[in-house]
């Protein structure tokens, strides 16, 4: 990849922002935790395109290849490598950066890993959130925080109900419940430290964002459907699908990212109304099974086969999960842009280009722009 230029810093000529309030990110100081991960790398790319000054805080990229390295993430942000469990370092980073916005994505995000390291999952996802919120608490200035949790925070009875934000929190596996814990922490901090009565001093609206299963180019995590599919397709091997009938709200990574940025910019305008929890997911008809997504991927890729491995002794993962996005649609005026087919098409276009050795940044710019520019 010989892409010396950093085209994310160039604004598309003759275009206007899709949401005028995205102008708030121009020259804003933005801290992204988890910037070396899949969603974090897309977020720093988007923020650069919007003209923000980005600092990242996370561990070193954990996959090889990694999206962060592919896009030369060190050129897109001031990168600080640190553990989110290191309270002092997290606080000091926030005090040094003096951010206008914080997007907290750093997490142990894999359900199956959470069965192997439950305590670490709770520490990273629970106490990590506490440390970020405490850092914001220490700031003597306005700051908007968007805390990223997941669609898995709801107590899931698998009866096909689309969960709404007021539904009961729960979580069977340690990952899901650690994120439900994070939600309770966020709510507690909002009530205890960031409530309306504190606003005369500083505005620190804090929201939580619960997104569904995201797909997009550059995810190489283990035990996720699209990375598994792409690894198999690119090596001409059959795709092994573990839970073919599991139903998930699939969406392109740029969908929730546009939701996080919409939410953050709205909180600047009205810190009381929008400092709340919001679901970000696809339209109901894009809630598909793992097998349907796999078949669609094979059709788009042009070839491929799949098989079902031994299903015994697999750890529990939710079979049916769907989200109501009515609140984001009505209150934030946010709605998904791409359906599942478009999301998968763009994702596979990204991977095909990567494996062909094509320049990846122009493709990412092309995919980013419809979400943020007219
Ligand atoms: N990918 C999805 O489908 C999905 C769906 C819903 C919610 N989420 C949430 O979005 C966020 C980002 O997920 P992702 O898919 O980009 O995951 P990822 O694994 O690609 O990235 C995780 C990031 O967190 C950082 N991190 C992990 N442990 C850390 C620690 N101890 N200290 C500091 N940083 C640490 C990693 O360095 C990396 O930057 C997570 O909070 C995840 O729970 C993801």
Image (cartoon, rainbow, N blue to C red):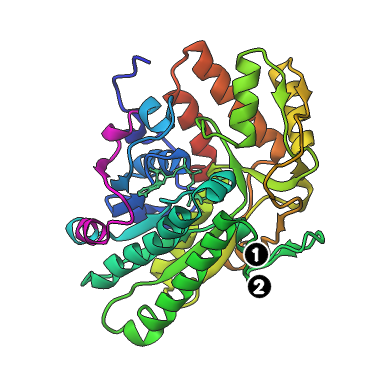
At x 56% / y 57%, what residue is drawn? Answer: 174
- Is residue 116 visible to the viewer in this orientation of the structure? yes
Q: Does the magenta stretch include residue 79?
A: yes
- Is residue 52 visible to the viewer in this orientation of the structure? no
Mark 2: secondary structure:
loop
The reply, left or right, for residue 226 in relation to residue 306 is left
Q: The magenta stretch spans which residues?
A: 72-93
Q: Does the magenta stretch include residue 219?
A: no
Check disc 1 and report the residue beneath it: 154
Q: In which quarter of the image is the N terminus?
A: top left
Check disc 2 and report the residue beneath it: 168
| Looking at the image, residue 8 lies above or below residue 110 | above
Disc 1 and disc 2 in contact, CB within 8 angstroms: yes
* Mark 1 / mark 2, whichever is N-terminal: 1
The reply, left or right, for residue 235 in relation to residue 13 is right
| Disc 1 crowd, CA 10 A, few/some/many (<14, 14-19, 20+) | many
Q: Where is residue 75 in the image (x, y as percent from the top left)?
A: 27, 32
């Amino acid at each position: 990849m010989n892409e010396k230029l950093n085209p994310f810093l160039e604004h598309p000529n003759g275009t206007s922002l899709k949401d005028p309030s995205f102008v708030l990110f121009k020259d804003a100081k933005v801290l992204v935790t988890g910037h070396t991960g899949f969603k974090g790398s897309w977020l720093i790319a988007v923020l650069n395109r919007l003209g923000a000054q980005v600092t990242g805080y996370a561990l070193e990229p954990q996959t090889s290849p990694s999206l962060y390295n592919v896009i030369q993430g060190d050129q897109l942000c001031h990168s600080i490598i640190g553990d989110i469990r290191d309270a002092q370092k997290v606080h000091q980073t926030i005090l040094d950066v003096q951010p206008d916005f914080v997007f907290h994505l750093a997490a142990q995000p894999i359900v199956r890993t959470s069965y192997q390291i439950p305590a670490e999952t709770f520490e990273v996802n629970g106490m990590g959130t506490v440390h970020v919120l405490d850092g914001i608490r220490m700031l003597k200035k306005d700051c908007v925080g968007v805390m990223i949790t997941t669609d898995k925070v709801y107590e899931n009875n698998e009866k096909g109900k689309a969960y709404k934000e007021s539904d009961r929190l729960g979580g069977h596996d340690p990952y899901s419940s650690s994120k439900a814990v994070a939600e309770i922490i966020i709510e507690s901090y909002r009530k205890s430290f960031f409530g309306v009565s504190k606003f005369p001093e500083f505005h620190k609206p804090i929201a939580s964002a619960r997104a569904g299963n995201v797909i997009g180019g550059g995810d190489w995590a283990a035990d996720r459907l699209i990375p598994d599919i792409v690894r198999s397709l690119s090596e001409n091997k059959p795709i092994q699908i573990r839970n073919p009938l599991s139903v998930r709200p699939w969406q392109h990574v740029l969908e929730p990212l546009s939701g996080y940025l919409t939410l953050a910019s709205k909180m600047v305008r009205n810190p009381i109304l929008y400092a709340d929890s919001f679901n970000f997911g696809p339209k109901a008809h894009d809630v598909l099974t793992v097998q349907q997504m796999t078949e669609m991927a094979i059709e788009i890729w042009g070839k491929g086969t799949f098989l079902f491995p031994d299903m015994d002794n697999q750890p529990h993962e939710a079979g049916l999960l769907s989200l109501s996005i009515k609140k984001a649609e009505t209150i934030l005026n946010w709605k998904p842009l791409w359906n599942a087919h478009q999301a998968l098409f763009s994702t596979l276009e990204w991977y095909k280009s990567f494996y062909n050795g094509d320049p990846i940044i122009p493709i990412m710019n092309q995919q980013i722009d419809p979400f943020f520019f007219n």
